[in-house]
Amino acid sequence: MPHQAAPSIEELKRRIRQIENSPSADAQQSKGKTGSRSRAKQPNQVSRKRMASMQSDESDSLGQKSSKDAPKAPTEEQAFRKIERLACMREHASKALQARLEKDGFDSQIAQAAIERALRCGLISDERFADVLVRSRLSQGRGLQGIAAELVTLDIDPYSVTAYLEATEGQTGPDELARALAFLDAKPPRGKRLRDSAYRKLMQKGYGASVSASAARIWSEEHETDNSLQAEFE
C-alpha cells in the first residue's frame, strides 16, 4: 500500500471549519447544552420532591401528636371516684351531686349513671342526707318552714324525713316557739321597733308566720319591759 503524504496545516484548518459549520455539529452542540440543562435541573427537582415529602411527614406527625395530646372526655368511672371523695367528707344529696359533677365538666348522662351506681351501693343516700340536714338546721335555730323549702329544692319530700316529722309534732306548739325565742336571745334583732325586727328575722330564718308573730310579740314585750326598768333605775 503506497504511503500517503500528511495533510498540510492549511488542509487541517479547512477540515475543521467544515466540521464546525456542518448541521450535525450544531445539533450535537444543542443536544449537549440541553442535556447539561436537564442535568442541572434534575437535582433541584429532587430537592423539591424531598422537601414536599418531609413537609407531608411532618404534618402527619403533628396531626398524630395533636390527636394524642387532645384531652379525653371524663368517664363514668372518674365521676364515681369523685363521688367517693366527696362522700368521704360529708353527706350529699343526689341532685346537688349532679349539679356539682356537671360543673366539673362531666356529661350529664355520665354523671347520672355514676350517681345511680353510688345510690345502689349505698355510698350516698338522700334519706341520710335529709336527716342530717334537718337536725343540723334545727340546731342552728332555723324554722321548719325554711327547712322544708330547702328540702324541696333538692327534690326531697320533707314528710319522708323522720327528723322532720319528729320536729313537726311541735311545729305550732311550745317546741317551735321555744326554739324561736332561743334564736332571738342568741341573735337579738336591731331596730327601734323590736317586734317588727324580731318578726322579720324569724321569717327570714324559716319560721312560720304564726310562730314568728307569737315569738316576736313575747320577745319584744320582755325586752321592752327590761329596757323600761333599766331606764327607771338610771
Image: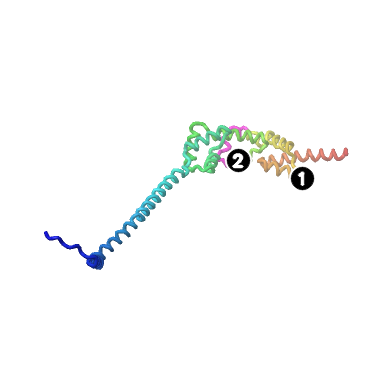
Residue 35 in the image: state x and y as whole percent. 29, 59
Residue 221 on the magenta span? no
Residue 108 in the image: state x and y as whole percent. 49, 43
Amino acid at pointer 2: Glu
In the picture, measured across the screen, residue 121 lies left or right of residue 41, that is right
* Quadrant housing residue 186: top right
Residue 195 in the image: state x and y as whole percent. 75, 43
Which quadrant is home to the C terminus? top right
Q: Is residue 22 visible?
A: no
Which quadrant is home to the N terminus? bottom left
Count of numbered labels shown in the rendering: 2
* Label 2 Cα crowd, 10 Å radius (few <14 / some 14-19 / many 20+): some
Q: Which residue is mark 2?
A: 150
Residue 154 on the magenta span? yes
Which one is nearer the viewer's eye here, 51 or 103?
51
Give the mark, 1 or 2, whose residue is nearer the N terminus: 2
Residue 25 in the image: state x and y as whole percent. 25, 64
> How is the structure coloured here?
rainbow
Q: State the CA–CA distance, disc 1 to disc 2.
A: 28 Å
Q: Which residue is mark 1?
A: 191
Q: What label sits on residue 1 in the rendered view?
A: none
In the picture, measured across the screen, residue 41 lies left or right of residue 211, that is left
* Label 1 Cα crowd, 10 Å radius (few <14 / some 14-19 / many 20+): few
The structure residue drawn at horizontal position 46% and vertical position 43%, both measured from the top left corner, is 69
Residue 30, above or below 100: below
Magenta segment boundaries in residue numbering: 148-166
Which one is nearer the viewer's eye here, 8 or 131?
8
Q: Helix, strand or loop at disc 2?
A: helix
Amino acid at pointer 1: Gly
Which one is nearer the viewer's eye here, 215 or 47?
47
Query: Please, what is the dominant secondary structure of the magenta stretch?
Result: helix
Residue 70, above or below 32: above
